[in-house]
Amino acid sequence: MRTFSVATGRTARLTPEGNFRIVNKIVNRPYYTGNIAGGHPSNPLGNRWLGINANGTNGNTYAIHGNNNPSSIGTYASAGCIRMHNNEVRWLYDKVRVNTPVVIVSSSRSFNSIAKANGYSLDGKSGSVPVSSAVTLRRGSRGTSVKQLQEQLTRLGYNTRGVDGIFGPGTESAVRRFQKDKKLTVDGVVGPQTRTAVFNSKSTGTKTSTAKKNSGSTSASQVQQATIRQGSRGAAVTELQRSLRQNGYKITSVDGIFGPETNNAVRRFQRDKKLSVDGIVGPQTWRALR
C-alpha cells in the first residue's frame, strides 16, 4: 500500500532479518531504560510501538516504532529496532493487527519477489515494484534507497564509484549513462520511469554501450570497481575485509561494514605497500590487494 523511509541498526547484525509477527501494540510506550514517560517529547520510542517476536523475544525488545529524532530516518542509527517518522508509524499502527506477518530483509528485489520467496501473495499483482519505488532520487539523496540503486546499477555494469548510500557525482554519472543507453531522458534523476527501467533490467544479457558483461552476480572484479572508505557498506566492503584477512591483517568480523578496524587495517596495508595512506580503497589499493 505504501513505502516509507526507516532507520535500522547501527551495524548490520543489530536488526534481525527473517520472518516474524506483530505480537503487541502499544500507544505511548514508556522508555524504561531512561525512565522516560510514554508520550513525552524526549521519549526515543515515539508514540507508537509495534512489537515483533524477533529472536524469540516477546515484543518488548524489537519493534517498529516512532522516534524523537526525525533526522535519523534513512540512516543506520538504532540499537536494532526499525524507526519510522511518528506520523507514518501512526498510519501503520492503525492498519495492522496483532499476528500480522513481518518480513525483514535487506534487498533490492521487488516487493513481489520478496513476498513470493516468503510464501505470500500481494493480492495477485504481478508487476515489479522496486523497494525504493516511492522515492525520487537525485544528487544529494542518501539512505537505503540510494544504496539499493547503486547495487543494482553495479550489477548491470554501471560503476557508481561506491555502494555507500550517498548519491554523489559517481552515482549521477552512472544514472546518466544508463538513461542514455535506455533512451530515457538524460537528467541524472531517478524518478518512476528510470527506477522501473533500472530494477526491471536483467544483470545477465544486458547489452549497452557502457555496460560491462557480467555473470548475473556481483563478482570480485565488479565490487573492486567501487571506491570505498570508512562508513561504506556492502559487497565491496565484504570483499575488502576478506582480502585484508587473507593478507594477514586483523579483521575480527567480515560483516560488510567499513568501520574503524577495517580503516586501520587498510591504512596499515597501504603503508606496508608504500601506497598513499588515506584509508580510501580505490583502484590502486584494490590492485595491490589482488
Image (cartoon, grey):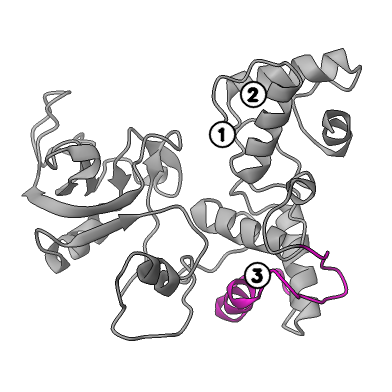
Question: Sequence-wise, which precedes: disc 2 or disc 3?
Answer: 3
| Contact? badges 2 and 3 (CB < 8 Å) | no
Q: Position of residue 80 (x, y in %)?
A: 32, 37
Viewer-proximal residue, 219 or 179?
Answer: 219
Amino acid identity at mark 1: Ile
Instruction: Identify the mark nearer the N-term, 2 or 1.
Output: 1
Q: Which mark is residue 189?
A: 3
Question: In the rendered image, which quarter is residue 1 located in?
Answer: bottom left
| Residue found at x 55% / y 78% | 192
Left or right side of 244 for 9: left
* Residue at horizontal 58 percent and vertical 53 percent from the top: 147
Q: Residue furthest right?
A: 274
Q: Which residue appears at 11% of the width and 24% of the height? A: 35
Amino acid type of disc 3?
Answer: Val
Distance Cα–Cα, label 2 vs label 1 = 8 Å
Element marked by disc 3: loop
- Dot 2 lies on which element? helix
- The x, y position of residue 93, in whole percent, is 16, 60
Using the numbered discs, state the Cα–Cα distance from disc 3 to disc 1 in whole angstroms.
27 Å
Give the magenta range: 187-214
The quadrant in which residue 116 appears is bottom left
